[in-house]
């Protein structure tokens, strides 16, 4: 981190042991860029639950309903392609459903997560991802759908924390969502859930220019070096 320059925030949770393996300023409120789309997706399923959609019918409902665009396509575009229009459409849908977004996030133990301004403490993002994987915050079917989308591979997914995929044992699970901003301000980050056997880890690393001199290539390389370590 020091060699790359910039300002760093990170957290690693060992869910099996129930402890933090590593913590670097994870309680600070920071811009989390597109990683906020994972909580948005979780809120979508909370809104469907509020509407009384049974868990067993979720896949069918997503394929048949929306607000001009099918929810299934919006969800995939947001999580896999990281499309901004899809994110806006889903947030509008969630609000129209009547779900109290702030109250729901508070109930989930993440009161400082702001899905509109895309700011949050990394420790609360990590807590949401842990709740997603452990099935504590969404239904089993919602969990299956969301993790399936987070596991889809796209170009460049073998970079940042994605370098871990070549190091993990056969049968390991790897789910991630990255965050990037290069216009106006620089934000380079990644969040991943890793699981194999009984081991489960949540890893989040975010970097910002800070007061030092750095660039996106240096920050990305540092994330990859840390991941390998």
Image (cartoon, rainbow, N blue to C red):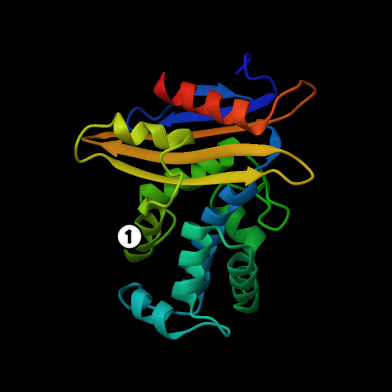
Q: Position of residue 22 (x, y in %)?
A: 50, 22
Q: Secondary structure at mark 1?
A: helix
> Which is nearer the eye, 112 or 193?
193
- Left or right: residue 72 versus residue 220 is left
Q: Position of residue 24 (x, y in %)?
A: 60, 23
Q: Can residue 106 be seen from the camera position used here?
A: yes
Q: Kindly identify the residue that appears in the image at 44 percent across and 74 percent down.
A: 72
Q: Position of residue 43 (x, y in %)?
A: 54, 63
Q: Kindly identify the residue that appears in the image at 68 percent across and 51 percent down.
A: 118
Q: Kindly identify the residue that appears in the image at 41 percent across and 37 percent down.
A: 162
Vertical arrangement, residue 2 with respect to residue 130, above or below: above
Vertical arrangement, residue 173 with respect to residue 63, above or below: above
Asked which quadrant contains residue 105, the reply is bottom right
Q: Position of residue 194 (x, y in %)?
A: 35, 38
> Which is nearer the eye, 69 or 108?
69
Q: Quadrant of the C terminus?
A: top left
Asked which quadrant contains residue 15, the reply is top left
The residue identified by callout 1 is 144
- Left or right: residue 126 versus residue 122 is left
> Which is nearer the eye, 156 or 23?
156
Vertical arrangement, residue 81 with respect to residue 98, above or below: above
Q: Can residue 46 be seen from the camera position used here?
A: no
Q: Quadrant of the N terminus?
A: top right
Please rate how many residues cluster around mark 1, counting C-alpha atoms within 10 Å: few if below 14, some from 14 to 19, many from 20.
Answer: some
């Amino acid at each position: 981190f020091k060699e790359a320059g910039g300002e760093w925030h990170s957290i690693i949770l060992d869910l099996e042991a129930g402890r933090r393996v590593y913590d670097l300023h994870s309680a600070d409120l920071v811009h989390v860029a597109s990683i906020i789309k994972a909580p948005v997706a979780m809120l979508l399923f909370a809104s469907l639950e509020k509407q009384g959609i049974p868990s067993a019918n979720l896949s069918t409902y997503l394929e048949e309903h929306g607000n001009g665009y099918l929810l299934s396509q919006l969800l995939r575009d947001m999580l896999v392609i990281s499309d901004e229009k899809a994110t806006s459409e889903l947030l509008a849908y969630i609000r129209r459903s009547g779900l109290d977004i702030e109250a729901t996030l508070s109930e989930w133990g993440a009161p400082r997560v702001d899905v509109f301004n895309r700011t949050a403490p990394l420790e609360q993002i990590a807590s949401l991802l842990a709740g997603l994987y452990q099935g504590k915050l969404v239904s089993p079917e919602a969990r299956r759908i969301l993790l399936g989308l987070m596991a889809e591979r796209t170009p460049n997914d073998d970079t940042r924390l994605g370098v871990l995929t070549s190091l993990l044992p056969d049968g390991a699970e790897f789910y991630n969502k990255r965050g990037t901003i290069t216009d106006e301000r620089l934000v380079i980050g990644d969040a991943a859930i890793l699981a194999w056997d009984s081991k489960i880890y949540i890893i989040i690393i975010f970097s910002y220019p800070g007061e030092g001199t750095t660039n996106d290539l240096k920050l990305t390389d540092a994330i990859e070096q840390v991941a390998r370590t």
